[in-house]
Amino acid sequence: MLLSRMVFASLLQYLERLHPSQIANESCLASHHVHPNYTKKAFPVLSLDYHHIQVPFEISLWVLLASLMKLGFHLIPQLSSIVPESCLLIVVGLLVGGLIKLAGEEVPPVLDSNLFFLCLLPPIILDAGYFLPIRPFMENIGTILMFAVVGTLWNAFFVGGLLYAVCQIEGTYLSQVELLPCLLFGSIISAVDPVAVLAVFEEIHINELLHILVFGESLLNDAVTVVLYHLFEEYSGAGEVTPMDVVLGVICFLIVSLGGIAVGAIYGILAAFTSRFTSHTRVIEPLFVFVYSYMAYLSAEMFHLSGIMALIACGAVMRPYVEANISHKSHTTVKYFLKMWSSVSETLIFIFLGVATVAGPHAWNWTFVSVTVILCLVSRVIGVVGLTFIINKFRIVKLTTKDQFIVAYGGLRGAIAFSLGYLLDKNLFPMRTMFLTAIITEIFFTVFVQGMTIKPLVDLLAVKKKQEAKRSINEEIHTQFLDHLLTGIEDICGHYGHHHWKDKLNRFNKKYIKKCLIAGERYKEPQLIAFYHKMEFKQAIELVESGGGVKLPSAVPSQVSMQNIQPKKLPPPVAERALPQFTKGREEEIRKILRSNLQKTRQRLRSYNRHTLVADPFEDGWNDFILKKQRLIELEKKMSNYLTVPGATPDSPTMCRARLASDPNAFYNIKASSDGVPTIQVDLASPQSPDSVNMLNEFSKRGATGQGLGQREGADRDEDQGLMMKPAGKGEKGEEEGGNKNPGLMRCLSDPGPSNEDEEDEPFLP
Amino acid sequence: MGTLQSLSDEPEYRELAEKTGFSFEQIGILHKRFKQLSHNENTLRRADLDTIPDLACNPIRTQIIEAFFDKRNFHQNGDGTVEEISFEEFLVVMSHFRPPALNMTEEQREKVRREKLRFLFNMHNTDNDGTITLEEYRHVVEELLSRSGALGKETAKGIADAAMLEVASISMGHMEPDEFYEGITFEHFLKILKDIEIETRMNIRFLNMDTTTLCNRDSSSIR
């Protein structure tokens, strides 16, 4: 006691000598200086040192504000249905900026260009690029490129040129604005902004084609904007642009866009290759995705290439291979992190826009601003209509007038324009403040007016909305079939159309690239099989999550069972007739539950040890899952589809998680099981096991139609007898065959291929 | 272009154009291709189509080739298969892949969709009994997966079974245990594939561009 007090006292004495804010900085009690003139004051028990933590604290405060705002909007449903989120966020930003100004503080220049381009923009673009639906994007790539390149050029020159003409008119007092700054302004303001487009289009659920057209355009016009911006900025000082410069500009455009894509693709391949070796360190897998993508962006920006295109290319290239390699959980992590970051970024951007509006020096000029707004609208409409006229000559699916209207109306401007304007040098461009004011006004106009009215207009014009239907296996089969059919017909015609090239690319991909970039044997798995397993897996999960109850997901047929489609071969033996029959729905449920819960049941009853760290039983046990399923299918055939053994306990997700947390080693002992009888009979045959009894009760509670309860218990025992007898020898053989034949079936999410279903909406593991 | 212009005068082309909806240039190009494939004869045989090198790696090539020789696709209410086809029949089969015109009414669109789906249905329904049975469907899936190595048969069967189950449940709703679902009829087929916009997807771009010299081994450079 005395000793500790002494230690404590000496510690206090030492601390006394230090300045309070230095206490944290002292890493070890190493060399310290004792001031000879130090006068002792009272020991500061509590002190405030805001300065120390100011920067991170403010950043966190902003992020918190953004997130709370987002929460708030969704709690008020009426508000979010009328006004798009982006508008509300800008208003919030205005309020916050106003508050800061009222408080007398200087409003911080929050939409600093560095912050914007290096921190706020990349997550949004990466999210967009990683989840880009490749198939519709590639199918419409010609149209998208036309809009992005030619459309943006047209907009820039039209707006810039006419603005210059207006400025030259007497009476506007704008004659000091030269041609080149006008063109520069035109190029800044003409680019459609991906952030704003995403924010607004997300809520209107428009059909896939229009969405990908506008969104693709907003992504790809970055290269044009970069080149035009740099070109005009460079030569504004010189005052003129020679034809040589124009040629160089075109070359620069090609380098910027193709170079950006190349940089992105290289990093994408690196990421894919790295992910091949991560099977032992699953925890850091998502990190590779993020870091490689960010580095792609930074590398592109370093060379003044198009960072946005680099990010898109990186995400799109790495996705199929990375997803084949990383674990289920890592995939979920990547998805949720990307969504989270992009969501926060987007919110912050809009709030900052509002704050910057309050903060920035403004120079309002009625003529300039109003002419800008009108010209932007006019040029967009003319551009879209004119381009569509040309494009429709080459498209199979023509763009109707309604489509054109939506494309034109959906050309929103956003924070990228503002940041580019902010970057302008004050000395070279004395009218910078006027430009900024005009840019902000244009952004407000598009986001508020166009953003708010686009939803009612879409409904009014009855534009086709996004189809929410889940992809069925028939559609998948026929999509593949169609692909091959069309390729074949093209070959017969002798016509090297895009099916031909796509097929060639796929074959090249399968033969060489996948071998390098995908670990193990998974690269052999064709898309259809991957889709099928994924669907089964999903159905199993959904069933487990819903408690394995009566309510099946809608994609699962509940009233028609396998036997309805199997041709009747033999009359079923009399013995089985005596068994009570379940309804078809019950059968399907049971089958599905069995398939999904089989190994979990076994695992639970073997040993319940919650201290064993689980690697990823769901994933690592997939192979066994497949084996069991195959055994099950064989069993089914034997029994001619009368499967009346109830499955495992339909658990709530919590129970499911608890079970997963138990000993996974049970999985690997299956093959070594001494009895050699499949696991089905171990648990379910013993009604004494409390779980099986509960499960039986559960089933009865779930309101099975008209089946006797007492009969059920007896039936189980009989059925279990039946099950036990059959596969004694078959099990082993099936296992081996299955094991050897199907190394490639381990992953359920391998290579979804170019046709991606809307992954964002699907439930994953809790 | 000079040679193509004279083609529009040929009366047979006019008749063909009316029948199939192709333009004269397109018919001219396809005729050239037909002649090239059939080695300048008037009829085309299966063996001629087999020689196309690119077709060799297509998993469903047999079915595609069969479709050309299937009388059901000739729009003449015929049945069975033939051994050789003329240019007219070739053109009729190709016309299934023509893109729909821009301004079509809803009924016309529906008609086009039915026609294209009927083509697909005929491809699956090899025994021409009006339904796609489970065996036929299994065969389709097996063929599709035949290029992917030894992963096969069981999975193909599983997939086909699941697909059949889906069709049955969507089309029939509830079925008694004793009922047997014979197969996918054409109406059911229409129903399950109504979400794939067939009329916009099942198309080949028959642009009318000039053809350069055709070389025997490779296909022409029709763009």
Image (cartoon, coloured by chain):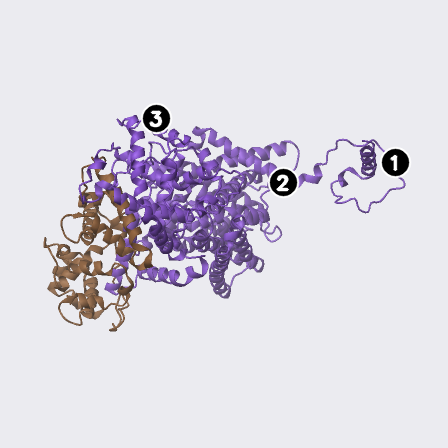
Chain colours: A purple, B brown
Residue A504 at least partly seen: yes
Disc 1 target residue:
A39
Q: Is residue A221 above or below residue A88?
A: below
Neighbourhood count class around disc 3 (C-alpha, 10 Å): few under 14, some 14–19, many 20 upward: few
Q: Do discs 3 and 2 belong to a common subunit?
A: yes
Q: Is residue A590 above or below residue B69?
A: above
- Please tell me whether mark 3 sits on a helix, a strand or a loop: helix
Return the x and y of residue A689 as percentages of the image width and height: 41, 32
Pointer 1 or 3: first along the chain = 1
Pointer 3 or 2: first along the chain = 2
Residue A375 at least partly seen: no
Return the x and y of residue A133 as percentages of the image width and height: 39, 49
Disc 2 target residue:
A108
Q: Chain of mark 1?
A: A
Neighbourhood count class around disc 1 (C-alpha, 10 Å): few under 14, some 14–19, many 20 upward: few
Q: Chain of mark 2?
A: A
Return the x and y of residue B131 as percentages of the image width and height: 17, 47
Q: Amino acid at mark 2?
A: Pro
Number of numbered discs visible in the structure rendering: 3
Return the x and y of residue A173 as percentages of the image width and height: 54, 46
Disc 3 target residue:
A701
Q: Quadrant of the N terminus of chain A?
A: top right
